Amino acid sequence: MDIELFVKYLRYEKRYSEHTIKSYETDLIQFRNFILAEHKISEDSYVPDFKGIRSWMISLSVQKYSSVTINRKLSGLKTYVKFLLKKGIITEDPFAKIISPKNKKRLPEFIQEDQMNKLDSPDVFTDDFSGIRDRFMLELFYNTGMRLSELINIKHGDMDLISGSVKILGKRNKERICPLNNYTINIYRNYLRSKKEAGFSDDKNASLFVTDKGAKMYGNFVYRKIVHYLGLVSETDKKSPHVLRHTFATHMLNNGADLNAIKELLGHAGLAATQVYTHNTFEKIRNIYKQAHPRA
């Protein structure tokens, strides 16, 4: 299995995000190691086949991996198989006979509006560079519904105060423009002042978000910050940047936004991925019905 060549294909031809590339590479290495250990064959001569893929799926299931995790791991392997088919290394798709495990449908978790409003309290964020940056970072997530990988790659030149918008580079290098409300713009201006005072660059090609020492922002740093702040206002089990993405979409829908508009703001390729948020809205309607209808 030539995983290194596949990684180069994803990076330079498909232009996948580094996060996706790392995920696929990790899963492929796990698959390769399983095959070599279980089937005692040479790595150079092996290409994914039905028997090997099926036995790996069974192994993951026995290890109590969830159907969601198994399907995520299979996604990387499917992409690798497509790569082999494209290069003519194999002529038949082993996944043609594979039935993927069904995922249990779960509603996206989100933070309630009154809980998000608690983050406006003056004692939540410190008034130094770190606190001002964290406040802007969290507000930008909630204002736009952007992904973690998208936030850490924003540059100052992507912010447009004249039009009140931010340019976001999403999956497959697809650009989208998200509007910024006045509240977020004012927080951004405060962040700009604080960043200059800290001696960090605000050049158009400089990273919008930096660490306390001025280095380019990275995923784990942001994740820890978001978990911390959401933990101050919510007791929900899941706390992450992606929960803020769900929160943005759910609140927009609950307040009358068009589903197609939310789709464009989130950068979804199709409407099906956005429709999951309608279930949260229906739950809200159901609760109102139960409280208001005399026979409910």
Image (cartoon, rainbow, N blue to C red):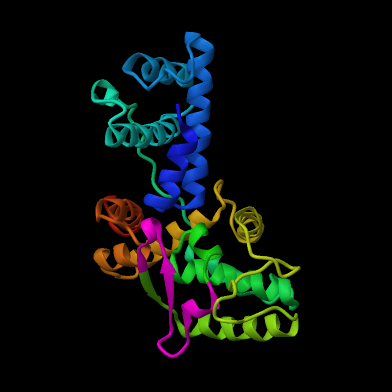
Q: Is residue 193 left or right of residue 105?
A: right
Residue 243: percent from left, percent from top? 49, 55
Residue at image coords 63%, 53%: 220
Query: Disc count in the image?
Result: 0
Q: Nearer the viewer, residue 259 or 152?
A: 152
Residue at image coords 50%, 66%: 141
Q: Is residue 257 left or right of residue 247?
A: left
* Magenta residues (range): 155-175
Q: Is residue 172 left or right of residue 133?
A: left
Residue located farthest toward the bottom when viewing the structure as drawn: 162
Residue 48: percent from left, percent from top? 37, 22
Q: Does residue 119 sit above or below 198 in this rendering?
A: above
Q: Nearer the viewer, residue 45 or 102?
A: 45
Q: Does residue 27 sit above or below 199 in this rendering?
A: above
Q: Nearer the viewer, residue 69 or 245?
A: 69
Residue at image coords 59%, 82%: 203
Residue 13: percent from left, percent from top? 37, 50
**Residue 251 visible at all:** yes
**Residue 62 visible at all:** no
Residue at image coords 50%, 10%: 38
Q: Does residue 296 sit above or below 135 in this rendering?
A: above
Residue 178: percent from left, percent from top? 39, 74
Task: Examine the structure image and report whether residue 170 is included in the region drawn in magenta.
Answer: yes
The quarter in which the N terminus is drawn is: top left
Quadrant of the rendered image containing residue 86 = top left
Task: Examine the structure image and report whether residue 40 is included in the region drawn in magenta.
Answer: no
